[in-house]
Image (spheres, coloured by chain):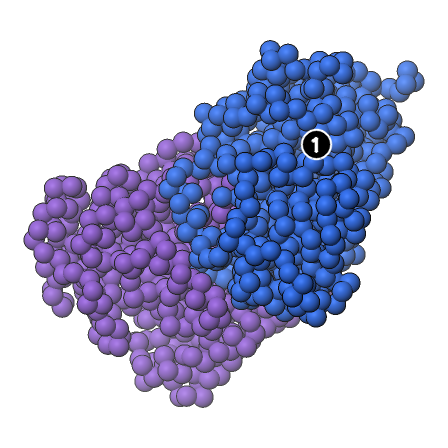
Chain colours: A purple, B blue
Amino acid sequence: MASRPQLAPVLRRLGRAPAHLRRPAALQQSVSLPTRCFSSSRPRFFQRTAVVAKSTNFTTETYPDIKRDSRFAQLTPEHVDYFRGLLGSESAVIDGVTKHEAADDIEPFNSDWMGKYRGRCQLVLKPGSTDEVSKILKYCNDNMLAVVPQGGNTGLVGGSVPVFDEIVVNMGRMNRIIDFDEVSGTLVADAGCILESADQFLASKGYIFPLDLAAKGSCHIGGNLATNAGGLRLLRYGSLHGTVLGIEAVLADGTVVDDLCKLRKNNTGYDLKQLFIGAEGTIGIITKVSILCPQRPQAQNVAFFGLESFEQVQLAFRAAKGQLSEILSAFELMDEGSQALVRQVTKNPSPLEGRYPFYCLIETSGSNADHDGEKLQSFLEDVMEKGIVADGTLAQDETQVKSLWAWREDITESLSHLGGTYKYDVSIPLKEMYQLVEDTRARVDAAGLLGDSDEFPVRAVVGYGHMGDANLHLNVATRRFDERVEKVLEPFIYEWIAERQGSISAEHGLGLMKKKYIGYSRNPTMIGLMKNIKNTFDPKGILNPYKYL
Amino acid sequence: MASRPQLAPVLRRLGRAPAHLRRPAALQQSVSLPTRCFSSSRPRFFQRTAVVAKSTNFTTETYPDIKRDSRFAQLTPEHVDYFRGLLGSESAVIDGVTKHEAADDIEPFNSDWMGKYRGRCQLVLKPGSTDEVSKILKYCNDNMLAVVPQGGNTGLVGGSVPVFDEIVVNMGRMNRIIDFDEVSGTLVADAGCILESADQFLASKGYIFPLDLAAKGSCHIGGNLATNAGGLRLLRYGSLHGTVLGIEAVLADGTVVDDLCKLRKNNTGYDLKQLFIGAEGTIGIITKVSILCPQRPQAQNVAFFGLESFEQVQLAFRAAKGQLSEILSAFELMDEGSQALVRQVTKNPSPLEGRYPFYCLIETSGSNADHDGEKLQSFLEDVMEKGIVADGTLAQDETQVKSLWAWREDITESLSHLGGTYKYDVSIPLKEMYQLVEDTRARVDAAGLLGDSDEFPVRAVVGYGHMGDANLHLNVATRRFDERVEKVLEPFIYEWIAERQGSISAEHGLGLMKKKYIGYSRNPTMIGLMKNIKNTFDPKGILNPYKYL
């Protein structure tokens, strides 16, 4: 470690002779590579879940106030016969589930990967076509069978697993790339395509999926739409409401909505597909997606900084926006608490020599490596000279890019290795963004719940997220789930956000977790209109019940 | 004219010594400035309309099949008294209107600027606040008075003027900038702000409105949202579905929907604001807008090319996408027919010496003039060397930028000076985009309607539009409106588009003009769902009747 040069002095030295440099090659040699990193070979969801599931409490035990809707039918042998006749026994998986005796083949569909939610579903259906989805839903609607649409099941709010005995409709078999137009960049694909697979296909064509997130190896693009995932590069490529051109979806009664438009402009009536983006499977099941993909950047740079205060982080962000402008593709924030937990779990050596209260990861993506390098160097010199940044390092190849990104992307998974996490995904005006972490930490501490030894349920209160979108992930890392912790956190956090007109769910959705808190971000008029929409599309309420609204 | 050097040979010469150039200054000197251009001092709508209006036929005469909905009440003195009491007599403008005796103060609100549509409205209301809009609509809903929401009234499909005696609610008085966040770039403004005024405000802060279109001097940002305007730089900044963060709107019954979110990420329930974007005032009146604005580019370049075929245009587009990438902000197409009409009306000298079947305008916007200049020069050399482009010119200052843009932006207005225009705003897969113009021209010619002398109703069939979005504006320029022409054009054009799964309304909306043709771009399931949405938001149907669905 001692032999690793720090970037800061190097940068300051270079600052005196910038004219000599086309690209800061000298800087790049100062990077030391972490030796171990699990982002590049991220374990797949099902491996993880099978382990977690059997020790997870049933949701109905954790939340005894939620009652099963008696309007829904119980599953009968006749129902199962119908689905087996339709799909075959391999795609209509049935099993008896009793507490702590769940069969492995159905359990991963019942539980979320964090080990927080666990349903009692007895039947998982895996349709292979839109027609099969349509027949499944028509039958369920006719027979009052409740349904949970499920993609990669990587969500964080309990939206993609059953609460009671809802039938799971898992989209994993519908995973084809259907069409790609190399001039316009329009991709048409099944909803069950894994995000990383879709992106790898696009990479072979010189394009990129306009969304990236840590769960990319497991999550489905249909699920990304259903939850309106934002992810790491929203700053650059914008939201799915702008990039999605069309969808095909199946309504609760089996009606197929064909809105699989491939055109960038189509002003012919209400843009109904927008309702499905972020609807979390409550008004229909998305079966196909048409999305506009940008050209894959030919040059990519990633820098990682240490900063002394959140004020400095804000200054660095403004400087990056101004100076990196059209090539800035990510500006991520991590506090020391979150990085300490990653170090503890991964045992990776930190990219910087010292410890700082805050770290930022900045990524640029562009079409000309020389131009991007010049812009980045000029930015680096500026923030170093002004003392905005205390130390930093710059990736010099694709492996190092991944290693630096791992310090951001591995936070969620590292926390899950240490115990349960209370996760809050919120949007707040930028200048107050980190204050929520400090206020929450002080509150948990004052309640005597935060400490270094086993007697304290809370290990740490940490914050990280997408600075570029004012989107904070507040995580309360626990040794064990404890009701006292939840009571200290809620509704305190929601009230804190509502006072600042923030959003209690920036990108992770409402799911089961935030159903009852929507009133902190939406007024009664809006909620009333939303309920009308739900009733219009799913009058019997069979789709993803107990959640969302 | 003979002394003006052409760009083509200059470019080829430079191609041999690119290393000497940071920015193609020598090229810029080859530009000859048009001496007259009406884009920079575009006449305002009201001046124009007052002239046009009295000679325009009433819509009910042109389309006698449309019948007044007898459920709607007739305006009474009691109604007028209520509105005058609410708004004052200057903001509740009443006048008796009989054929060809319209009072000047109300006529501009009754007629569209093209002189194609003219209503018989007797009352124009100009609310000054959301509360006034709410009280107006509640009263209208309670009394079954039909309403036409109206912004800048610059639309092309008859969506913003009455058909019969609907009351016009004009938003022009609600024109304040409410809030601007200089870190995030979020602008909050009244719906009645003129687009150009909002952009000028943003320019003073170093930001840009993420939408630009030829009518910017008159159109309102609320109207832009209501029609989901696409415009000139959608290629770069994306659609309003991605950039609009929130709206405030008033429903038919006076309910105020407060969704004026300033956050980039807010996944808390159905994204209802998306329904209002492109709803053409049929489910509510947008009163305020919150929109994310990008930083204003510090460098801008505009090039104008002549090309020998549509195949060459496609090659140029692919090259521009690949080589200009993140700085490409517009790629516009104009055919020689459209440019000939602009020359005829404006008398401006053409930017290029020769005549070519096609012209393209390419704009780059970026943060570093040197980098952008290098990218553009490399692109220019490539397309010249490969013979993709026959000739070209490059703007060297802001005045020349405007002059070159005028050749694209002045088409619509030039056509309107020569007589009526049948306008079709369509989206088609790129490779067939121009074929529609050729097929339509052949059809009109075969019907004996196209010719150079006065006996032929059709002067020219021309095409132009946003190549970057596969969005063609097919314009049939007439000497006079003639029923035979419309019969030759429709439904031929809509069928041609439906066969290719295009959109019959890329960006101009449905309005009155395309109401009956929505079936060519939307299936019965989609139309049924849309009608449900309409009924949910406006159960009595008072908002913008006779149009849209």
Q: B399 or B451, which lies in front? A: B451
Compared across the picture, whether B435 is left or right of B498 comes to: right
User: Relative to A319, is B87 above or below?
Assistant: below
Say what secondary structure mark 1 lies in: strand
The chain identifier of the residue carrying mark 1 reads B
User: Can you tell which quarter of the image residue A317 is in?
Assistant: bottom right
Residue A203 visible, this orientation: no
Quadrant showing the C terminus of chain A: bottom left
| Residue that mark 1 sits on | B362
Query: Which residue shows up at 31% across the image and 44% down it?
Result: A255
Where residue B78 sits in the image (x, y, percent)?
65, 66
Q: Residue furthest right?
A: B3
Q: A381 or B8, which lies in front? A: B8
User: Relative to A40, is A467 above or below?
Assistant: below
Where residue A23 sits in the image (x, y, percent)?
66, 43
Badge 1: few (under 14), some or many (20 or more) residues near its Cα, within 10 Å? Answer: many
Query: Which residue shows up at 39% across the image and 63% down it?
Result: A531
Query: Which residue shows up at 52% across the image and 50% down it?
Result: B70
Q: A542 or B304, which lies in front? A: A542
